[in-house]
Image (cartoon, rainbow, N blue to C red):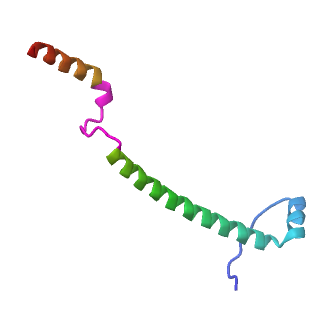
Amino acid sequence: MKAHGYSWRLSEVLKSDIERKMPVSSLLELAVREWLKRSSADSTDSVLQKRLHASAEACVGAFASGNLRRAESARKTLRAKLKNRRNAR
């Protein structure tokens, strides 16, 4: 038994078009159930995607320097390493 009501405003034309096919309350219930099913699937997909990304990072070679600004200082770091290599010869 349904215990709660919901108020929804729509045009007379839309309401009559809907009611020719099914009661508005049935349509709302169907739409909400479908939305809940999809939103649950989306969150499951999101968790799965995060797990897949974490697994791929272990295989694909990631930089693990811990330096969050590594890209900004890459040129300076590379030049210093090349200079040290030349000086070692």
> Is residue 1 a member of the stretch shown in magenta?
no
- Along the horizontal axis of the image, is 65 left or right of 31? left
Q: Quadrant of the N terminus?
A: bottom right
Query: Residue 55 at x, y = what percent?
Result: 37, 52
Residue 20: quadrant of the picture? bottom right
Identify the residue at the far bottom of this view. Answer: 1
Q: Quadrant of the C terminus?
A: top left
Query: Residue 70 at x, y = what percent?
Result: 29, 30
- Along the horizontal axis of the image, is 42 left or right of 32? left
Q: Is the stretch drawn in magenta largely helix, strand or loop?
A: loop
The answer to whether 40 is drawn above or below residue 59 in the figure is: below
Which residue is pictured at 74% across the width and 68% down the height? 28
Query: Residue 26 at x, y = what percent?
Result: 77, 73
Which residue is pictured at 29% across the width and 36% down the height? 68
Which residue is pictured at 32% across the width and 40% down the height? 61
- Along the horizontal axis of the image, is 13 left or right of 76? right
- Along the horizontal axis of the image, is 36 left or right of 17? left
The magenta region covers 60-73
Closer to us: 61 or 4: 61
> What is the tally of numbered marks visible in this picture?
0
The answer to whether 87 is drawn above or below residue 50 in the figure is: above
